[in-house]
Image: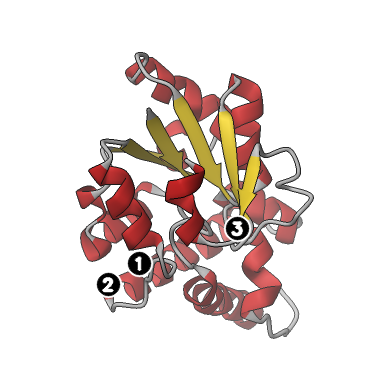
Amino acid sequence: MTLVFDYDGTLHNTKHLYGCAFRTAYDMLVKEGHAPAHTYSDDDVSKYLGVNAPDMWNSFMPELPKDIMQRASMTIGREMISGIRSGKACLYEGIPEALDTLKSRGMRMFILSNCRNSYMEAHRGQLMLDRWFDDYFCAEEYGFIPKEDIFLSLKEKYPDTSYIMIGDRASDIKVGIAHGIKTIGCAYGFGTGEELAAADCVIASPNELPDII
């Protein structure tokens, strides 16, 4: 059995880290005349968590020139990595204990995330993720294609196993639908009830993970 986890909103509580980075990038856009002055709260921008960078900007400010969009995106990435390295990254309460239990049961675990490679590498080092996870599949490495398409590469690399997909957004549940595997929706994350409606089961807390699996 192989467990495939989304990262932000499933394992990592990203809201404040992302909110700070987002506001830095938006302030840059305001100062350069690309956006009107506005203050976004952590909750305002949490809907973009778990969405890959190109899709996030195309949804938030589709009128931005592509080069400005790219620079703002890189600013968010840089600020988030700075926050990770300064100790601001944190796993949800109960996640380390749940992962310890699953690892002790012989479960193989991967991460499949819409993030950039550098972002995941920073987390791996700061939070010592390799004690639990055997492999990482980041959207940047695959040109930010949808997760259900990245899963094809994952399955090709590890064909002789069954899978469960665990995540908090519709993109995670789509992996299960596309590939006929079980899904666990994480209601404590950043997705809506509607996004998780098609999951095989939904949990309200990380503490529920070992028993559900």
Q: Which residue is mark 1?
A: 81
Residue farthest toward the front in the current orientation of the protein:
211
Q: Could you tell me which residue is drawn at 27 percent across and 44 percent down?
A: 103
**What is the three-letter code of the residue carrying label 3?**
Met
**In 3D space, how far apart are the residues under numbered discs 2 and 3 (Cα atoms)?**
25 Å
Is 138 placed left or right of 114 in the picture?
A: left
Q: Amino acid at mark 2?
A: Arg
Kindly check if marks 2 and 3 are in contact, taking CB atoms under 8 A apart as contact: no
| Residue 148 appears in the figure | yes
Which residue lies at the image location 39% right of the left edge and 61% below the top edge? 95
Q: Do the CB atoms of the residues marked 1 and 2 lie less than 8 Å apart?
A: yes
As drawn, 121 above or below 93: above
> Secondary structure beneath disc 1?
helix
Q: Quarter-wise, where is residue 125 in the image?
A: bottom left
Marks 3 and 1 sit apart, C-alpha to C-alpha, by: 19 Å
> Residue 85: which numbered mark, if any?
2
Of labels 3 and 1, the one closer to you: 1
The earlier-in-sequence mark between 2 and 3 is 3
